[in-house]
Amino acid sequence: MLFCKILKHCFSFETRKINSEKPVVLKAFTVWNENLMLSMTPIKATYIEKNNYYSIQKPGWILFELIPVIRQKEGNHHLEWDKKKQYSLSIKQIGQLLVTKNKAYDETSNFLITYKTQLNEKKFMKINKTAQEINLSITQDEQQENQFNPFKITLTQAEYITALELINFSLPFLIGWDALYTPQYSDNDSLD
């Protein structure tokens, strides 16, 4: 019976609240280079109430955005939001990306993750790893990668590992498992 109270409490807010009733806010992780910014944002799962229980309406995903940057002499920069490229990773594609973590330092490898958009366009995320750096690119044409691709960013090993760790940490939020734990009920639940 207490478990039902926990679920009701967890799902009673649009954004789950923790301890002091503050909303959970997931911020973007960003990496900059000379002419491009990579932004990686976790998008949480959404829920729907059905009869007497709650269900995940839509699982979350990780949104990757590559945004061109115009640098100015004064040291300022301008982001060209209208020219950005986006790539959404579902849970399955996140698994494909996390597999690359085990080989991050000791091996040179190439990975290609593809998906189709709602408009049935194919998109490619390509990861080329060398001993010192990782090149990440997003294209809509596999052949475009062989040509000059302005949507390619170089990450250091540390930036790449940080991004993968953040993705790994975000998994419970993406599939709704974060709603299973509520600190104020955890002690009482162990008594059932």
Image (cartoon, rainbow, N blue to C red):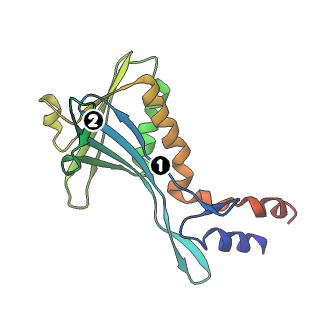
Numbered circles on residues, count: 2
The extreme front residue here reads: 74
Residue 27 percent coordinates (x, y) = 47, 49
Circle 2 Cα neighbour tier, 10 Å, few/some/many (<14 / 14–19 / ≥20): few
Residue at image point 24% right, 46% down: 85
Circle 1 Cα neighbour tier, 10 Å, few/some/many (<14 / 14–19 / ≥20): few
- Residue occupied by mark 1: 27
Q: Secondary structure at mark 1?
A: loop
The quadrant in which residue 10 appears is bottom right
Front disc: 1 or 2: 2
Q: Is residue 72 or residue 153 the one in the foreground?
A: 72
The quadrant in which residue 189 appears is bottom right
Q: Earlier in the sequence, mark 1 or mark 2?
A: 1
Q: Is residue 99 or residue 190 the one in the foreground?
A: 190
The extreme right residue here reads: 191
Residue at image point 54% right, 78% down: 49
Residue at image point 53% right, 70% down: 14
Q: Is residue 77 left or right of residue 172?
A: left
Amino acid tagged 2: Asn
Residue at image point 74% right, 58% down: 183
- Residue occupied by mark 2: 76
Residue 13 percent coordinates (x, y) = 58, 71
The quadrant in which residue 36 appears is top left
Residue 103 percent coordinates (x, y) = 46, 24
Q: Is residue 173 or residue 146 the one in the foreground?
A: 173
Q: Which mark is residue 85?
A: none
Amino acid tagged 1: Lys
Q: Secondary structure at mark 2?
A: loop
Residue 72 percent coordinates (x, y) = 21, 33
Locate the C terminus by quadrant: bottom right
